[in-house]
Structure formats: C-alpha cells, structure tokens
C-alpha cells in the first residue's frame, strides 16, 4: 500500500500530531483523509517525491550479491562481464 503524507490545513487549529506532516498507509482507492484522527482539524494531502533507494541497486557488487550477472558493451558485438558468474566476455557473431 502507498504511503501518503498529510498535515493540518491551518496550524492555528492543529494538534502536535497534525501540525507537522505525518504519514498514513492507504489503498490508492481510499478517499483522502479530511480530518486529523486526533483533533479533527482539516487536513491537506501533500505531494512529495518517492523515496530513493539508499544504495545503488545496479552497482556490480549489489548485483553479484543478489545472484545476477551484468555485462557492459565494450565494442560492437562485444560485452565484458562486470559482475556475477559466467563467461568473462560475450561476442555477438552476427555483428
């Protein structure tokens, strides 16, 4: 389920819970929250960027650790292994 952020529309009517943004897990089909579950203050739904992975998931070390093999193109029809198991090079003989 996605995580949505809300905060009080007006800080003057807000409690400690909704004065700052707070997160709620909701289905995409759920209606947005209209009122703070603690004090009843009117809420606004915030638009925020999705969280980015903390590690480079496509790094050679991460791919090898997860059991994947990665090849990088090093020339026309020629690929060199950068991570994982398998042959060190691949050649496309059609090129």
Image (cartoon, rainbow, N blue to C red):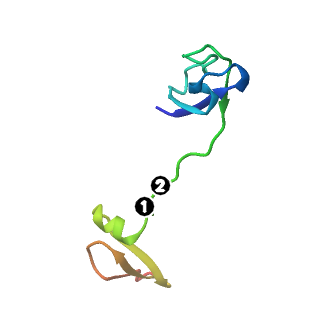
At x 58% / y 26%, what residue is drawn? 16
Q: Which residue is mark 2?
A: 53
Residue 66 lies, with reference to residue 23, above or below; the image says below
The image shows residue 31 at horizontal and vertical percentages of: 59, 19
Distance from label 1 to label 2 (Cα)?
A: 7 Å
User: Residue 69's x, y, as percent?
Assistant: 33, 69
**Residue sitting at x 70%, y 19%:** 13
Q: Nearer the viewer, residue 76 or 29?
A: 29
Q: How many marks?
A: 2
Q: Choose top left, top right, bottom left or bottom right for residue 12.
A: top right
Task: Return the residue at label 1.
Answer: 57
- What kind of element bears circle 2? loop
| Left or right of residue 70: residue 16 | right
Decide which of 34, 63 is in the foreground and name it. 34
Q: Is residue 70 above or below residue 66?
A: below
- Label 1 or label 2, whichever lies nearer to me, is 2
Tell me, for residue 1, which label it has, or none: none
Q: Residue furthest bottom?
A: 75
Residue shown at 63% from the left, 28% from the top: 19
Residue 63: where, in percent of width, then height?
A: 35, 65
Q: Nearer the viewer, residue 87 or 93?
A: 87
Q: Residues within 10 Å of mark 1 (few under 14, many from 20)?
A: few
Contact (Cβ within 8 Å) of mark 1 with mark 2: yes
Give above or below for 44 relative to 85: above
Q: Residues within 10 Å of mark 2 (few under 14, many from 20)?
A: few
Specify whether 31 is left or right of 84. Answer: right
Would you say 24 lies left or right of 57 here? right
């Amino acid at each position: 389920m996605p995580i949505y952020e809300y905060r009080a529309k007006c800080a003057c009517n807000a409690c400690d819970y909704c004065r700052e943004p707070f997160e709620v897990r909701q289905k995409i089909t759920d209606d947005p929250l209209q009122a703070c579950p603690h004090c009843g203050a009117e809420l606004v739904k915030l638009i925020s960027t999705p969280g980015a992975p903390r590690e480079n998931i496509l790094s050679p070390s991460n791919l090898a650790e997860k059991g994947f093999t990665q090849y990088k193109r090093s020339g026309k029809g020629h690929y060199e292994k950068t991570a994982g198991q398998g042959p060190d090079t691949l050649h496309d003989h059609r090129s």
